[in-house]
Amino acid sequence: MFVNLLIVISNFNSTVSDICIIGTACDTVQSSVYGKFMGESVAKLGLVAFVIYFMMFFWFYKSKVYIIPTILGAAVALYFLYVQFFVLHQLCSNCIIIEVAMLIATVIYFVDRPFFMKVSVL
């Protein structure tokens, strides 16, 4: 979420240069047609989504309801990884950190779920 916040700040503040942890393709990726969704910056939408996701964590983590934002977040992360690797052929290190964090959160969620661990043997 911190990396996502840095991206949003760099998009809002013209005096802050593009913050790319590794490499220089972050600006290329973020300013591409995939950097906006319905006219809004994907970085801003991602920050809002992460805040909502973490707020839901405290209320719904033990519930099966939490599976919806978890799967949605993982799907979006996989989509943006696909776009970077196979469509744009440019890698934004900041974006990859955010996407990998979402995928790790998804794996942790499913590993920690007791209803996925139950195996019935006939």
Image (spheres, rainbow, N blue to C red):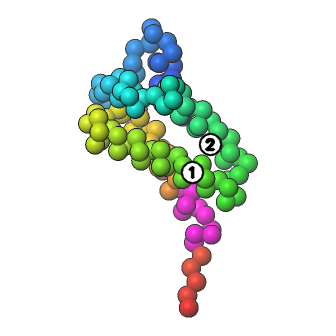
The disc, 1 or 2, on the residue closer to the chain's N-terminal end is 2
Residue 42: percent from the left, percent from the top? 48, 30
Closest to the observer: 16 or 37? 37
Residue 77: percent from the left, percent from the top? 45, 44
Q: Do the residues labelled 1 and 2 touch (CB within 8 Å)?
A: yes
Closest to the observer: 36 or 84? 36
- Which residue is at 73% across, 48% downward? 59
Secondary-structure class at tag 1: helix
| Range shown magenta | 108-117
> Along the horizontal axis of the image, is 24 left or right of 69?
left
Q: In which quarter of the image is residue 67?
A: bottom right
Residue flagged by tag 2: what amino acid is it?
Tyr
Does residue 66 appear anywhere in the picture?
Answer: yes
Does residue 4 appear anywhere in the picture?
Answer: no
- Residue holding disc 2: 53
Q: Does the magenta stretch include residue 45?
A: no
- Which residue is at 28% across, 43% downward? 86
- Residue holding disc 1: 70
| Secondary structure that dominates the magenta span | helix
Counting other residues with Cα less than 10 Å from the Cα at mark 1, is it few (<14), some (14-19), or many (20 or more)? many
8 lies above or below 53: above
Secondary-structure class at tag 2: helix
